[in-house]
Image (cartoon, helix red, strand yellow):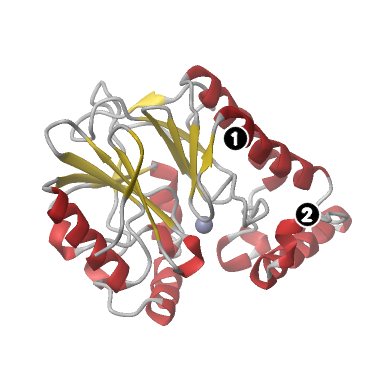
Amino acid sequence: MRELRQVATGVWVATAQVWTSNTVVVVDDDGAALVVDPGITRAEVDGLVAAVEAHGWRVVAGLSTHPHWDHVLWSPAWGAAPRFAAPRAIAALAGDVERGWAEASATAPGHDRALFGALTPLPTADGAPLGSPVPLGSPVPLGPPAPRGCRVVTHDAHAPGHLALVTRGVLVAGDMLSDVEVPLLDVGPGGDGARAPRDPVADYRAALDALERAVEECEVDVLVPGHGAVAVGREAIARRFADDRAYLRDPDGSRDPRLADAWVAGEHAAQVAFLRSRATG
Ligand SMILES: [Zn+2]
């Protein structure tokens, strides 16, 4: 069974050993639970099912922060609950689903193909699905069946239709604002630069701006990144933003300590090569 720790009232976090991935469970007073990015290996997802059951909660919905394979997995035990994602994320995954499933099968075998990336466009509080593209403004309220007090910010940093959840003073950031990963740009599906957005650095900066506004507006004092340590307190959160902005000012010349990790260094080298090719092409 996975260990869940409460970071704010009704907001619980489970951290996996694989890539220090964070799963978030938001629970209403009546036990209705929203699961954000349930985990990577089949054992982790099963362990989360057991932990949710042990708490006496029932999963009413899921939320997928972005269309990368490690964020669109699910458990058959929660099969009937809708799993929400931004429309742009759903479209991006649809165009790349076999590659994603192949990566999932290689790294985390045993998942159910029928559940892989089976996502529903996210509902807003007024019942209308969010249009596309979404302006980078204030967080948009999530409607039922999501627990009360959940809002989302949708942007295009790291992946198309990436969303952050803001609830109860907590920002669930997806693959951004990590203490173990530098900003990872959207350099196209599977690194196919020809299909990358026009200016992924500008997209990333715009998303950081939107998330920073959400921190102010929603009085966020806990930040949960998709991978890495939870940041507690406004100062620690501000440092995450500052570190990511510093990296983006000059990726090529960066001496960011997060580059000490071999995997991060590899991703960094690939995106620096991408940026150089864009600059000369
Ligand atoms: Zn990702």
Q: Earlier in the sequence, mark 2 or mark 1?
A: 1
Residue drawn at the location 16% of the way across and 30% of the way down: 29
Considering the image in quadrants, where does the N terminus appear? bottom left
Which of 33/233 is in front?
233
Residue drawn at the location 44% of the way across and 45% of the way down: 88
Using residue 254 as the reference point, say whether residue 89 is left or right of it. left
Q: Is residue 98 above or below residue 246?
A: below
**Residue at mark 2 to residue at mark 1: CA–CA distance:** 17 Å
Label 2 amino acid?
A: Asp
Which of 87/237 is in front?
237
Q: Position of residue 9 (x, y in %)?
A: 30, 32
Residue drawn at the location 51% of the way across and 56% of the way down: 227
Q: Position of residue 189 (x, y in %)?
A: 56, 62
Q: Is residue 8 above or below residue 214?
A: below
**Res. 79 in view:** no
| Badge 2 density bin: few <14, some 14–19, many ≥20, Cα 10 Å | some
Q: Position of residue 76 (x, y in %)?
A: 16, 64
Instruction: Check disc 2 and report its element: helix, strand or loop.
Output: loop
Which of 86/257 is in front?
257
The circle drawn on residue 2 is none
Picture quadrant where residue 260 is located: bottom right
Using residue 253 as the reference point, say whether residue 264 is left or right of it. left
Q: Is residue 201 above or below residue 47?
A: above
Q: Which residue is mark 2?
A: 256
Label 1 amino acid?
A: Ile
Q: Which residue is mark 1?
A: 237
**Res. 188 in view:** yes
Considering the image in quadrants, where does the C terminus appear? bottom right
- Number of numbered labels in the structure image: 2
| Beta carbon at label 1 within 8 Å of ligand 1 | no
